[in-house]
Image (cartoon, rainbow, N blue to C red):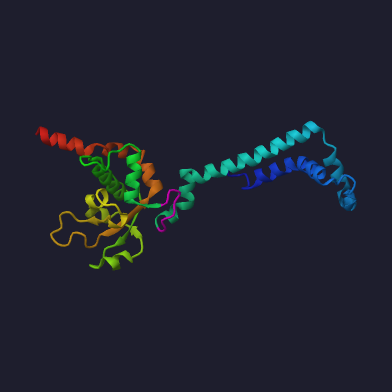
Amino acid sequence: MAIIPKYLPRVVGAVFALPSLWQGFKWLLDWGGRIDVFRTWGNAISHHLSNLPPWLNLLLLFAGLFLIWWDLKRSRQLALSPATAQRSGSAISHTHPTFRIGCIGVLDFAKRVEQAGWRIFGTHDLEGVDLLEGLRQAAIDGDIPFWGRQNRYSNRTLIDGEPLTPISAEHWREYQFDWTSVLKDSSNTDTHTYRMHSTENRTAGGYVDVHLDGDAAAAWLQSPAAAAFKGRRARLERERMRN
């Protein structure tokens, strides 16, 4: 399909539909007796277009409409295909948060995941923890880009004024999600990363208002990696209780 010029099917479809459109145009405006304006250069074209067999007019009309419909559908499918996203959006995806789903907050993504069947926000539900641990691993592996506002100040107003910037995979080796900030808060602006084992300010150097690439995260959610994390914390708890 790459060898077909981008708009060629639509042009061919329009050409196929032209005779029928011409007949309709003449019928609407009653130009049958006033076609003289085209005499110097259009008589031959008008004659051929006006005298096509009725069945051919109908066939060309449907063929033209089909080609236009097919090309529009093909364009949408190409735009939604992962290969197209990688070719045209890979350079953008790590610098600017613009995607089909969008650069969404991690809290918003967690709500979508719950709708997909994970138990996220219940009092005793541990799959929210599974999700956050899985997202952290995906970030380390480079499968999901993340953004956040860097926590460089003790003043929250100044932090909120920071732009969303990419969070490196290296950051996730030292930092993790504060589970409570995602699973118990109602606003994504409160989500943040921190160093659990730090003896100093755990959130220093972390990020707040954490966002992710919704398309990459949705693809990850359908992967075996996500399936391996779902229910993992509950399994570990059961094993700990048995021991």
Residue projecting furthest to the left: 243
Please indicate whether residue 148 sits to the left or right of residue 77 in the image.
left
**Can see residue 145?**
no
Please indicate whether residue 175 sits to the left or right of residue 28 in the image.
left
Please indicate whether residue 132 sits to the left or right of residue 21 in the image.
left
Residue 55 placement: quadrant = top right
User: In the image shown, does 125 or 152 lie closer to the viewer?
Assistant: 125
Percent from the top left, x then y, of residue 117? 32, 36
**Which quadrant does the C terminus fall into?**
top left
- Inspect the magenta stretch and tell me whether residue 4 lies in it: no
Highlighted range, magenta: 95-102
**Can see residue 86?**
yes
User: In the image shown, does 10 or 191 lie closer to the viewer?
Assistant: 191
**Which quadrant does the N terminus fall into?**
top right
* Count of numbered marks: 0
Residue 22 placement: quadrant = top right
Q: What residue is drawn where x is 52% and y is 46%? A: 79
54 versus 121 height, above or below = above
User: In the image shown, does 45 or 84 lie closer to the viewer?
Assistant: 45
Percent from the top left, x then y, of residue 207? 28, 59
Percent from the top left, x then y, of residue 197? 15, 54
- Inspect the magenta stretch and tell me whether residue 96 lies in it: yes
Magenta stretch, main secondary structure class? loop
Percent from the top left, x then y, of residue 192? 26, 56
Q: What residue is drawn where x is 11% and y is 35%? A: 241
Q: What residue is drawn where x is 27% and y is 48%? A: 136
